[in-house]
Image (spheres, rainbow, N blue to C red):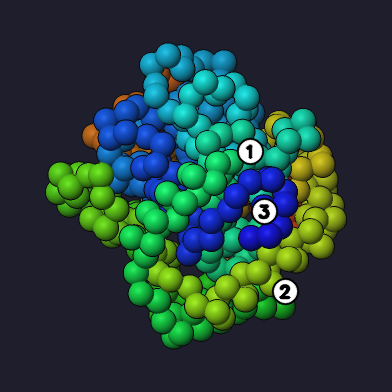
Amino acid sequence: MKLIAERTGRHCLSLPSNRLGLYLALRHWCVPGQRLLMSPISADEILFLVLAAGLRPVIAPLSPRDGNIDVSRIDLETVDAVLTTNLYGLPDHAPAFTGKILIEDVAHAMETSIDGRPLGTFGQAGVFSLAKHPEAGSGGVLAVEDISDLQALTRARDALLTRGSLRADLISVATSMARQAALKLDLVRPALTLMRALGLQEDREGYRIAVNPQDLELALKQVPSLPPFDPWVRADLHHYRARRGRLSRWYQSRRLAKVPADRARRLAGVRRLAELPTVAPAVRDDLARPLFRVPLLVRDRDAAIAELERRGVATGYLYDPPYDDYAPAFTEPSPDPEPARWWARHVLPVDPMYAARSLPILRHLEPPMQDPP
């Protein structure tokens, strides 16, 4: 947490997950019934956190250059607040949202800046993940400017935390260490096979968890409240509200301390992947950004994923379909959904830390047959 506090110059609150931090921030700064502008492409649980806070998700048009909110096509007068995504580490244009309540999801963008200013410092709150760049398996940090906000958020956090256990901490740490070992030893394919055989991966409909509209309608009758939404929000991280013990905190701090040391390797991977003709245009805007993933836009994304897995390269962090197709009854749709559909269908996020392992396959991938709408 010290690294994030030093980077942002803000007061920081330790959390068991990024998703709990986002909910706390939304509840602290927003009022139920307000309209929240958000990207159509982000993690499943984020949509349900917004609903749990009692807010109306207003889906923004998407820029096919970077997969984030297209600021040239939004009317901020029609919304009360904005939630950025900073997809794969490519920054949303945070300065464009000045004057609105701004909550920054910095899970993918721990090391990203805009004109030298770190993401997570533009809005009322920046919410970081220790499961992404640090690869700690769990953990989050909520960064705020005012000490009084920190104190109120601490009380709200403590009210939502559930009891942790040494067993849960051991499993979390061991799983994270095993994942890193599988990557380093090129054992991703057998690891994926084992996880699927043991039922350790969340059931999904395609790349999204099931909405279950009737159950969601019942949960919505209890907003603002987080526990009724646990069946959706806890996907792939069932202990997202559980207190962390000494072991988890020690491991998270150890993993976070390694992030600066990995920066050069991550940047080298970004530069190599940026040479591919299929790379998303915004990646080349600034090759000094150590992205969490490098988005490529390819013709047959699902076939590429299967081939990468056969070669021992795992692909994740796919958010297809966009929110307004995923849960149309629970969102206000984008005025132009086609660019988001195109992006969600073609994007292939690649880990720059393992660019060399992926490149023999990626060099042969073709761009989409049609340009973005």
The residue at the point 34 percent across, 27 percent down is: 35
Q: Position of residue 317 (x, y in %)?
A: 53, 52
Is disc 2 placed on a helix, strand or loop? helix
Q: Up-down: is 334 above or below 344?
A: above
Measure the C-alpha gap from mark 3 to mark 2. 26 Å
Dot placed on the residue nearer the N-terminal end, 3 or 2: 3
Q: Can residue 72 be seen in this view?
A: yes
Q: Is residue 372 visible?
A: no
Q: Which residue, given by chain and number where applicable, does mark 2 sit on?
A: 184
Determine which quarter of the picture holds residue 351. bottom right
Q: Which residue, given by chain and number where applicable, does mark 3 sit on?
A: 4
Graded by Cα atoms within 10 Å as few (under 14), some (14 to 19) or many (20 or more), the crowding at tag 3 reads: some
The residue at the point 68 percent across, 45 percent down is: 8
Q: Which residue, given by chain and number where applicable, does mark 1 sit on?
A: 121
Could you say which is closer to the camera, residue 292 or residue 312?
292
Q: Is residue 359 left or right of residue 31?
A: right
Query: Looking at the rendering, in which quadrant would you find the N terminus?
Result: bottom right
